[in-house]
Image: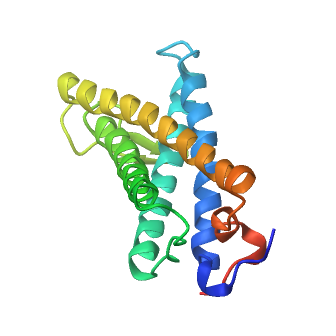
Amino acid sequence: MSTTSEEQKYTRVAIWLHWLIALLLLSQFAFGWLLEDIPRNTPARGNLVNLHKSAGIVIGVLILLRIVWRLTHRPPALPTSMTRWQQRLAGISHALLYVCMLLMPLSGYLASNFSKHGIKFFNAVKLAPWGSDDKQLYALFNQTHKVTALLLAAFVLLHILAALKHLFVERDQIFSRMWPRAAARP
């Protein structure tokens, strides 16, 4: 595979935020699904749920940082070898990834604030809920959180499959633009 020129690569910050958030999201997906197997109303579950919420807050902040970076640092242009419909589809899928990445932690945070439990940040600092203990609002935001997690998982899978297609089928330089080893300087 030929090397990608500096102007066709994402910045080091964008690349490291991409891979850090990717690893954290995959871990958080697994953690969230494992929580479903732990009996409710047990101290162990409460501690693990608070770790999940805390990690979600940290990931949410990193996602906001990634979005700010993306808005202030123009990404490399897509290659002209990609058809117009592929370029549009790439743009739409990236936008949907960002929407889900914002909506998932936000809905989880909102659900926590319409529950009597609130959040105990890393089981050390109690963040009292600022909303009332409202079962309907909690259910709405919690269901939004779960549905968004499934949508995000689907978009992440699509994103991975597209990246692998570019790497192994198209053999173009799309994949290498986001690979850490040859990152452009900010």
Residue 72: image x %, image y %?
41, 81
Task: Tell me the quarter of the picture where residue 151 sits.
Answer: top left
User: How are the residues colored?
Assistant: rainbow
Residue at 63% of width from left, 52% of height from top? Answer: 163
Residue at 66% of width from left, 83% of height from top? Answer: 184
Q: Is residue 80 left or right of residue 109?
A: right
Residue 139: image x %, image y %?
26, 24
Q: Report the front residue among 83 and 111.
A: 83
Extreme residue in the top direction? 39
| Residue 125 position (above or below residue 68) | above
Residue 123 appears in view:
no
| Residue 125 position (above or below residue 5) | above
Residue 70: image x %, image y %?
44, 73
Count of numbered badges drawn on the protein: 0
Residue 42 appears in view:
yes
Residue at 51% of width from left, 72% of height from top? Answer: 80
Extreme residue in the right direction? 1
Q: Where the C terminus falls, by quadrant?
A: bottom right
Residue at 38% of width from left, 46% of height from top? Answer: 100
Q: Where the N terminus falls, by quadrant?
A: bottom right
Q: Report the front residue among 131 and 63.
A: 63
Q: Report the front residue among 179 and 42.
A: 179
Q: Report the front residue among 74 and 50.
A: 74
